[in-house]
């Protein structure tokens, strides 16, 4: 019954449907006349008589020409009717037609974009996604759920759910466009009550998880609300807790405690030891053109995903290249004094060789006043050490990834452009023996 609602008075579509029918009828009539097929016998007989009266003979050529005229007329009428119908539907559904065609074109272009799977968490991954959503809609974010601090940690403990914080940040970053709803998702309650410190987006995701009893379905629902380009997938739905062996021999549990502990991290593991991977995460890795790790906190945002065995195995088995995006600055309490090769070595120590093919490092320098602000909290630019990186068996790609930003962080647009450049080179016909060197020296 729903389809008949288009015939209700006032919609102004019935006339164009009728016009389309007339055009279709003329098209059929003209076609039958062209092949002299006796469907409209009485009408054809009349046309034959008219032809005889005008020419003195039964002119089959004239009949065929008349059929062609009717076919053309029918096609023109149908095209006009379809155009009017589409225009009327757009007027009813989307009054601002000036933007509809551009939106349709943008969606078509994004649908043809590269298939990228980004693994990580935190603000670094959000920056990458914010830039990449304007390059492709074939975008998958595999996100850590090991956060146990702040609003996420409280909701984890109270509701026995996976941490929603990083998932929320990625959803907002991948939303089709900035809106009031997305700003509300990031709104954080103040005061001293039970809601104090909670993010509205975290509460929304927690409510969906409780309602559906399934984190994946909850994220699908939230993605529809925000009109997300691509998909956000947790690496695991197990309530994972991080455990770190520190340089002083102590074992510290919990992401927040690990980041705050005043000692170098030697080895990271998870509790449970082998979290179950989300099948959609494994599938996203398998179909990717390129896989990125980071940017983000090395030990608390990137590695927790790689400690999910099936996720790591999928990256190993994938035909896509794996690109590690190194942080611009060191992270106090986690990567103090780390060079680029130290980041790569830490990854290899945990996941083994052969997983990471390339490391993308920033060689742009932030403004002096920005560096002073970071130095005040113990954060400094990550030094690029090419010789040590080469010893790790990973190819170095260096580029200015910060652009003209007011912070020592990856510029989403610049980073997205560089990833697309790398992906296009990887898909070219360059000899594999010189590919690494070629990527490293190109700007």
Image: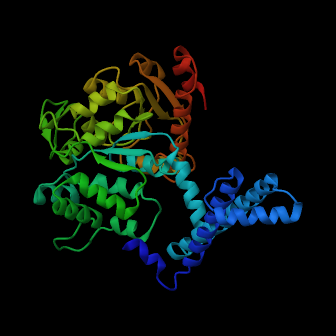
Frontmost residue, 406 versus 204:
204
Q: Report whether residue 333 is seen.
A: no
Give percent across and percent down for residue 174: 42, 54
Tell me if 107 is positioned left or right of 161 in this view. right
Question: Viewer-proximal residue, 171 or 73?
Answer: 73
Left or right side of 172 for 216:
left
- Residue 243 at x, y = what percent? 15, 37
Question: Which quadrant of the rendered structure holds the C terminus?
Answer: top right
Residue at 56 percent of width and 75 percent of height:
91
Using the rendered view, name the quadrant where residue 95 is placed. bottom right
- Look at the picture and state if 347 lies above or below 11: above
Point out residue 350 in the picture as x, y percentages from the top left corner. 25, 27
Identify the residue at horizontal 55%, vertical 71% (top origin). 90
Q: Residue at x 55, y 42 (%)?
A: 417
* Left or right: 301, with 322 as reference point: left
Is 218 located above or below residue 318 in the figure? below
Image quarter hosting the N terminus:
bottom left
Please count the marks in the image: 0
Q: How is the image coloured?
A: rainbow
Please state the horizontal and vertical placement of residue 307, each as a whole percent of the image.
23, 33
Q: Is residue 261 visible?
A: yes
């Amino acid at each position: 019954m729903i389809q008949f609602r288009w015939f209700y008075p006032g919609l102004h579509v019935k006339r164009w449907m009728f016009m389309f029918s007339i055009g279709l009828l003329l098209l059929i009539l003209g076609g039958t006349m062209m092949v002299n097929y006796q469907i409209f016998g009485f009408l054809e007989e009349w046309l034959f008589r008219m032809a005889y009266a005008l020419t003195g003979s039964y002119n089959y050529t004239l009949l065929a020409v008349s059929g062609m005229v009717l076919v053309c007329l029918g096609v023109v009428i149908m095209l006009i009717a379809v155009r009017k119908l589409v225009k009327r539907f757009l007027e009813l559904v989307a009054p601002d037609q000036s933007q509809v065609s551009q939106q349709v074109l943008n969606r078509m272009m994004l649908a043809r974009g590269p298939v990228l799977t980004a693994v990580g968490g935190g603000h670094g991954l959000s920056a990458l996604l914010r830039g990449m959503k304007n390059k492709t809609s074939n975008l998958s974010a595999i996100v850590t759920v090991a956060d146990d601090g702040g609003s996420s940690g409280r909701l984890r403990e109270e509701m026995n759910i996976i941490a929603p914080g990083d998932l929320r940040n990625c959803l907002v970053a991948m939303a089709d466009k900035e809106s009031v709803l997305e700003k509300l998702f990031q709104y954080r309650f103040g005061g001293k009550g039970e809601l104090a410190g909670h993010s509205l987006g975290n509460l929304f995701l927690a409510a969906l998880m409780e309602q559906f009893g399934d984190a994946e379905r909850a994220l699908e629902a939230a993605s529809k609300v925000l009109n997300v380009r691509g998909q956000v997938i947790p690496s695991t739905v197990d309530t994972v807790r991080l455990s770190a062996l520190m340089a002083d021999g102590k074992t510290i549990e919990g992401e927040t405690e690990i980041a705050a502990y005043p000692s170098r991290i030697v080895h990271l593991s998870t509790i449970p030891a082998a979290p179950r991977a989300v099948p959609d995460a494994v599938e996203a890795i398998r179909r990717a053109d390129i896989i990125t790790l980071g940017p983000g906190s090395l030990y608390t945002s990137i590695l927790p995903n790689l400690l999910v065995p099936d996720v790591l195995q999928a990256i190993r088995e994938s035909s896509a290249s794996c690109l590690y995006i190194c942080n611009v600055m060191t992270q106090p309490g986690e990567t103090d004094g780390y060079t680029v090769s130290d980041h790569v070595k830490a990854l290899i120590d945990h996941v083994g060789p052969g997983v990471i093919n390339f490391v993308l490092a920033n060689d742009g320098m932030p403004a002096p006043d920005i560096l002073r602000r970071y130095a005040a909290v113990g954060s400094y630019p990550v030094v690029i050490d090419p010789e040590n990186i080469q010893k790790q068996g990973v190819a170095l790609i260096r580029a200015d990834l910060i652009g003209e930003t007011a912070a020592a962080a990856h510029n989403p647009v610049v980073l997205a452009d560089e990833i697309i450049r790398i992906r296009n080179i990887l898909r070219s016909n360059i000899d594999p023996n010189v590919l690494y060197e070629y990527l490293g020296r190109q700007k």
